[in-house]
Amino acid sequence: MKKTILTTALLLFVAVCVAVMLFKDNRGLSIEATETMAPATVSQTGLVAYYFHGTARCVTCRKIESYAQQALTEAFPNEIEEGVLTWRPINVEEPENQHFIEDFALSTKSVVLVRYQEGTQSEWKNLDQIWTLTGDETAFKSYIQTETQAFLEAL
Amino acid sequence: MEGMGGSILTALWLGILTSISPCPLAANIAAVSFISRDAGAPRRVLLTGLIYTAGRALCYIGLGFLLIHSLLSIPAVSFWLQKYMNQLLGPLLIMTGMVLLELLSLPDTRGWGTAWMQRIAQQGNYYSAGLLGILFALSFCPVSAALFFGSLIPLATAAQSSVLFPLIYGIGTGLPVLASALVLAFGIHSLNRFFETVTIIEWWTRRITGSLFVLIGIYFCLKYILAILP
């Protein structure tokens, strides 16, 4: 009897999951979507530090987001206050944000620095060492701060 | 040559790093449990583990070859696999676990899905270990995607090696799982010899493996399909 209840419950759960998987709005990551999306811009000259993530968040991804944000707020409070530096977490699984995947050649959750001159994107860099530095908070923050400083100096 | 040796070691380290990072932990627990369930025969565990590792390596070679020699977009492939393979894995693990627990007895059909699950369920079936390796390798999480697509593929492209580097990386991803399975199997084997309770322990290892598959499958469903877990 218990076995039947367990089997039925598990099969029902699987059926619900498959139904959700099939019917929920799985708008694909199509290349065509990139062309119709507005380009990433800001209206002024400044630096935007993007953190690109998905809907499902992993422990390491949250740690990266937290360390990166702390690194910027600790080292550049004035620049953030003045609006020269902006921290912007973005969910790239949202349809309107999917263009960022191709714009910055993202392969996973990433921190990308983008410099804008009078609203036009002039330079960007994917800080791809973040994944190997997550075990060392000091080195991670130092890496983010050094790269950000270099970008700010070129403004 | 020295540079090549260094790059090969880097590829191996990237693979090991992928396997020991927290995000593939759930899949690795399922793999260790699956590989070590023939605990009464450590040689069979070793062979199953090697085939599981070969399955992973084969998958990475195929992906690496396609990405380096075709016009496939690395970002598109990476995000597609991260999103959809993890969703698919949940129901698949639950169903496989149910077969292992004998909650489901599948009809003797030749359908692809049931044939796959029957193969998985058959104890000591090496073919299923290879399939499991391929399936888990395709289920990229953020860390494995960063290390494979962001570090390994550029390394392989620079060295013009679309086979060797993904192969070494694949071996690296399988090594910690293989080592853990062997330690577990030898431990259980010693218990077997001490207590002479082979049948009971094998009965339990099969049920523990099945239960882990179901629980890990539920975890994947809650996280990647229903988005209930953070």
Image: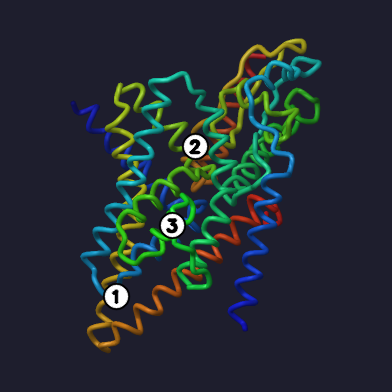
Q: Decide if residue B16 is in sight here.
A: yes
* Chain of residue at mark 1: B
Location of the N terminus of chain B (image quadrant) = top left
Q: Nearer the N terminus, badge 2 or badge 3?
A: 3
Examine the rendered structure and indicate whether residue B73 appears above or below residue B9: above
Percent x, y of residue A38? 76, 18
Residue type at mark 3 is Asn
Q: Nearer the N terminus, badge 1 or badge 2?
A: 2
The reply, left or right, for residue B55 in relation to residue A46 is: left
Q: Residue at x 65, y 52 (%)?
A: A18
Near-viewer residue (A135 or B107): B107
Percent x, y of residue B80? 57, 35
Residue type at mark 1 is Gly
User: Badge 2 is on which residue?
Assistant: B146
> Crowdedness of circle 3 by 10 Å Cα count: few (<14), some, many (20+)?
many
**Does the residue at mark 1 contact the one at mark 3 (Cβ under 8 Å)?**
no
User: Badge 3 is on which residue?
Assistant: B28
Near-viewer residue (A18 or B13): A18
